[in-house]
Amino acid sequence: MNDLKEVLNILQEDPNSYVEIMTDEVNTLQGIYFQTHQMKRCFSNYPELLLPDATYKLNNLRMPLYILMEIDGNFVACTFILQHENSISISYMLNIFKKQNLLWTRTRFWGEEITI
């Protein structure tokens, strides 16, 4: 499944899903953000807690898969893969999440508002 076009076609089969590609200045893939309508709906029902996790060596591109989970890890809010695990790339993906999920402002950390 290294054919990026094929992967994107599969991700975009559902017209209610949101996919965004992050590239660098020479159009090299840096990341892919993916969220289904169901993921978005589940997050809107329980926006108070987000649990980030990353899985490594899941694909032969060596790009970690990030998963934002909610409540006790039973629901996935969104997923994204990144070429580089740096603050710029992670912030870029979290900003997509914020644009797609306006209830992110209800997310709390130890009873306080969280800045993502």
Image (cartoon, helix red, strand yellow):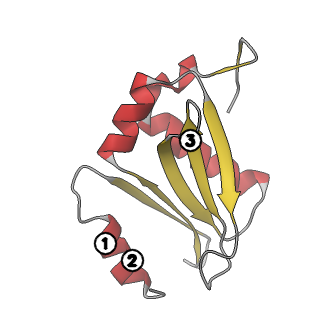
> Going 58% across and 44% down the picture, which residue do you hit?
68
> Which kind of residue does numbered mark 1 sit on?
Ile
Q: Secondary structure at mark 3?
A: strand
Marks 3 and 2, how far apart in space? Answer: 23 Å
Q: CA distance from mark 1 to mark 3?
A: 22 Å
Closer mark to the observer between disc 3 and disc 2: 3
In the picture, measured across the screen, residue 3 lies left or right of residue 94, that is left
Which residue is tagged 2?
Answer: 7
Quarter of the rendering occupied by the N terminus: bottom left
Q: Amino acid at mark 2?
A: Val
Residue at 72% x, 11% y: name it: 111
Indicate the position of residue 56 as horizontal and vertical percent values.
70, 69
Q: Residue at x 23, y 58 (%)?
A: 14
Pointer 3 residue: 69
Q: Earlier in the sequence, mark 3 or mark 2?
A: 2
Coordinates of residue 71 in the picture (x, y in percent): 56, 30
- Contact check, label 1 and label 3, Cβ < 8 Å: no
Q: Residue at x 65, y 73 (%)?
A: 63
Q: Is residue 24 above or below residue 92?
A: below
Do residues under tags 3 and 2 come within 8 Å of each other at their CB atoms? no
| Foreground label between 1 and 3 | 3
**Label 3 sits on what residue type?**
Met
The image's mark for residue 10 is 1
Sequence-wise, which precedes: disc 1 or disc 3?
A: 1
Residue 41 screen position, x and y as percent: 34, 33
Q: Secondary structure at mark 1?
A: helix
* Label 1–label 2 contact, CB within 8 A: yes
Q: Position of residue 107 (x, y in %)?
A: 60, 22
**Residue situated in front as seen by the camera: 98 or 46:** 46
